[in-house]
Image: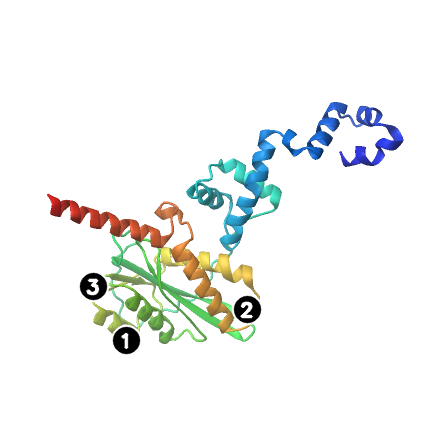
Amino acid sequence: MAFVDEHRALYGVESICRNMPIAPATYYAHRARVRNPELQPRRMKRDMILRPQIQRVWKENKEVYGARKVWRQLNREGISVARCTVERLMRVMGLYGAVRGKTCYTTVSDNASACPPDLVERQFAALRPNQLWVADFTYVATWRGFVYVAFVIDAFSRMIVGWRVASSMKTDLVLDALEQALFSRHDIEDVIHHSDHGVQYLSIRYTERLAEAGAQVSVGSKGDSYDNALAESVIGLFKTEVIRRKGPWRNLEMVEFATLEWVDWFNNRRLLTPIGDVPPAEYEEIFYQAKEEAVMATVLK
């Protein structure tokens, strides 16, 4: 169309269209739609309405959502749209979700230390909040050296209940994340705390704190790449959606602030497929609401 516009005065529309070949009617219809958007087909009109909404959802969710998550969020907001339409428009708009990279490992085992049993056996399923917690940590390269980020995750909703950023991967790192989890949650007696064979999680200070809180200690089987898969999955999202996209990282403070923002978004707004494409906080709220309604129904009987 641009070529015809540029040369029509010299050669005429019909002769150009005859040689391209394009029907003159197609060109004139296109020009009419440019002058009057009301003449556009319904699909084009619908696309013009959907584009800003897709852009908004993608932006509001840290530019990490792919077509499926954007489609889910639009439908949650009452905007009915087909997934293939979202995929097509995102491709045209140049919008893409975050893609996972290679996995990094920080586990340092102590073969001399006694190891608690594996109470989970790769079954990361829970029927209620505070039934199973999984813990792990990762590293982030900054201009001032490595910093380490530890997480404690509730397996029921994938809620991040505790986290910590530190310049050292000593026991204090994971212990501070655990203390935050213990402070933020209630009714945690008999919760199973699952981790890998890292010396930090098997340290005397850490295991004593778990015993004091009434938690059961579980450690994954050695040499099993899936022994702590749920925690590694969440950390993989963290590395994909924050660390690899927002760098380079100058110092610990930058990583800490970015982690704070991401954890808040992850817990309260990010849609997670394993729990039905709802945020973790909403999933737990649905659970407690259903539990309360069941209790009320029992009382009324």
Which mark, by number, is residue 249? 2
Q: Is residue 45 left or right of residue 280?
A: right
Tell me the CA gap for discs 2 and 1.
33 Å
Label 2 vs 1, first from the N-terminus = 1
The residue tagged 1 is 204
In the rendered image, which quarter is residue 170 located in? bottom left
Label 3 vs 1, first from the N-terminus = 3
Q: Amino acid at mark 3?
A: Glu
Query: Which residue of the protein is positioned furthest toward the left in this rendering?
Result: 301
Quarter of the image with the N terminus in it: top right
Which mark, by number, is residue 49? none
Q: Amino acid at mark 1?
A: Ile
Give the image location of residue 39, x and y in percent.
Answer: 65, 29
Q: Nearer the viewer, residue 58 or 211?
A: 58
Q: Is residue 210 above or below residue 299?
A: below
Tell me the CA gap for discs 3 and 2.
39 Å
Q: Is residue 192 left or right of residue 98?
A: left
The residue tagged 3 is 189
Q: Is residue 233 above or below residue 3?
A: below
- SS of the residue at dot 1? helix
| Nearer mark to the viewer, of 2 and 1 | 2
Give the image location of residue 292, x and y in percent.
Answer: 21, 50
**Number of numbered discs overlaid on the protein picture:** 3
Instruction: Write the residue at 42% across / 61% down.
Output: 263
Quarter of the image with the C terminus in it: top left
